[in-house]
Image: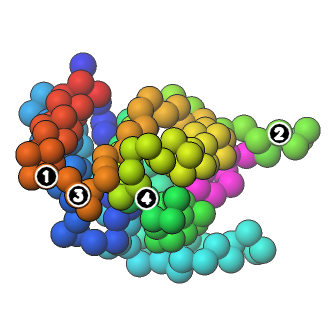
């Protein structure tokens, strides 16, 4: 069964290993017939700061188009590096701006949020230089932020969250192995 897959690239640098992981995933997904669209946050034009919480304002055209893609995709795949224990500011600003009320969630009369993106699933792939022995301690906040406080709150179910690294001392052989893993992951969405 084919799926509509939205790949969101949150790395500001197109020449990153993060980009290579994404390309491998997309290759695998397309090889088995999935329809894949890519949204590179770095290519969008929008104001990073979420002033919209203070007052209503119209979203920039790139953010409206991003919402259309997010509505289209039933399965999201998010790629980004871990910097200082979390996602880059560009990606966080994008999520702050695009996951608006009445698109991603709505507060019910009792004040409890209702996720409006239910039925969607997500895989998250990170790159990091954090040594494996310290990853659990330093990266748990990143995982909890997305699973509980951002995507989970909007109704999106996270199926997998994996970190590749440390990159700074990884061998070419190890990186090739990671790229092959991603081709396989794309095939078995």
Q: Contact (CB < 8 A) between labels 1 and 3?
A: no
Q: What is the number of the mark on residue 82? A: 4
Point out residue 153 in the picture as x, y percentages from the top left corner.
Answer: 66, 41
Q: Nearer the viewer, mark 3 or mark 2?
A: 3
Q: Which residue is mark 3?
A: 169
Query: Which of the two discs, 3 and 4, sits closer to the camera?
Result: 3
Given residues 15 and 4, the one toward you in this image is 15
Give coordinates of residue 184: x percent, y percent. 17, 30
**Could you tell me residue 97's position as x and y percent?**
58, 66
The answer to which of marks 3 and 2 sits earlier in the sequence is 2
Among numbered discs 2 and 1, the one appearing first in the sequence = 2
Name the residue: 60% across, 49% down: 141
SS category of the residue bearing label 3? loop
Q: CA distance from mark 2 to mark 4?
A: 31 Å
Q: Nearer the viewer, mark 2 or mark 1?
A: 1
User: Magenta residues?
Assistant: 99-106
């Amino acid at each position: 069964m084919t799926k509509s897959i939205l790949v969101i690239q949150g790395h500001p640098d197109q020449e990153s290993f993060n980009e290579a992981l994404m390309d491998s995933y997309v290759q695998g997904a397309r090889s088995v017939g999935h329809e894949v669209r890519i949204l590179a946050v770095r290519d969008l034009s929008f104001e990073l700061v979420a002033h919209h919480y203070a007052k209503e304002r119209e979203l920039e055209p790139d953010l409206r188009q991003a919402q259309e893609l997010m509505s289209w995709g039933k399965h999201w795949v998010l790629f980004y590096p871990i910097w200082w224990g979390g996602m880059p500011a560009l990606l966080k600003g994008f999520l702050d701006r695009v996951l608006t009320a009445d698109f991603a969630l709505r507060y019910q009369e009792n004040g409890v949020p209702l996720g409006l993106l239910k039925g969607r699933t997500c895989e998250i792939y990170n790159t990091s230089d954090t040594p494996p022995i310290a990853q659990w301690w330093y990266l748990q906040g990143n995982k909890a932020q997305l699973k509980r406080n951002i995507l989970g709150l909007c109704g999106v179910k996270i199926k997998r969250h994996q970190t590749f690294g440390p990159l700074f001392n990884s061998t070419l052989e190890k990186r090739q192995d990671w790229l092959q893993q991603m081709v396989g992951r794309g095939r078995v969405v």
